[in-house]
Image (spheres, helix red, strand yellow):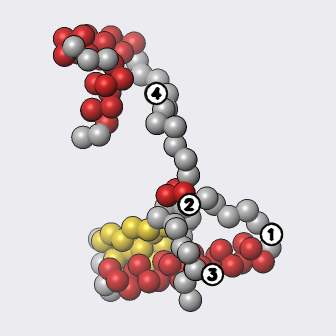
Amino acid sequence: MVLENDRYTYRVTWAEDDNEYVGLCVEFPSLSWLAETPELALKGIRKVVADVVRDMQDNGEILPEAIACKRYSGKFMVRVPIEIHRNLAIRAAESGVSMNRLASSRLSQ
C-alpha cells in the first residue's frame, strides 16, 4: 500500500553492481528498492516509504518534510577560495553583470 497524498521525491536509476534498477527517495536516503524494471523499482520504494512513515507515525517520530513542499528563499551562501572569488568578480565585471547573476547562470547549467 502506498501513502495517500505522497509528496516525497523519488528517483529510479540503474544499479550496475546489482544489475537491476534501484528506487530511491531523497527524503529517506537510507532506503532503496531493487527491481527488474524501473516501474517495479518505483512501486517498491514507494511501498517501503509508506511502511516506514506508518511506523514512524505509530512511534510518534517526526516525519521528514517533503522537499517539494518546502519554501526556499532563493538565497544560499557559498564559501570559495579568495582566488576564485577574485576571478568571478573579474568575469562578472567583464561581462557587465553582477557576481550573483554570473554565479546563478553558472549554477543553472
SS of the residue under disc 4: loop
Camera-near label (4 vs 2) is 2
| Rendering coords of residue 91 (x, y %) | 23, 15
Horizontal relation, residue 1 to residue 53: left or right: left
* Point 68% across, 64% down: residue: 63
Q: Residue at x 21, y 13 (%)?
A: 96
Q: Residue pushed farthest bottom?
A: 1
- The residue carrying mark 4 is 78
Pointer 2: what residue?
66
Q: CA distance from mark 4 to mark 2?
A: 24 Å
Q: Amino acid at mark 3?
A: Asp
Q: Which circle's residue, 4 or 3, is located before the other in the chain?
A: 3
What secondary structure is found at the residue carrying circle 3?
helix
Looking at the picture, does residue 2 appear above or below residue 23?
A: below
Tell me the quadrant of the picture where the C terminus can be found.
Answer: top left
Mark 2 or mark 4, which is nearer the start of the sequence? Answer: 2
Quadrant of the image occupied by residue 3: bottom right
- Of label 1 and label 2, which has the lower sequence position? 1
Provide the secondary structure element on which disc 2 rests. loop
**In the figure, 77 relative to 54: above or below?**
above
Specify the amino acid type for callout 1.
Answer: Gly
Number of other residues with Cα within 10 Å of mark 4, as a class: few under 14, some 14 to 19, many 20 or more: few
Q: In the rendered view, tell whether residue 109 sits above or below residue 85.
A: below
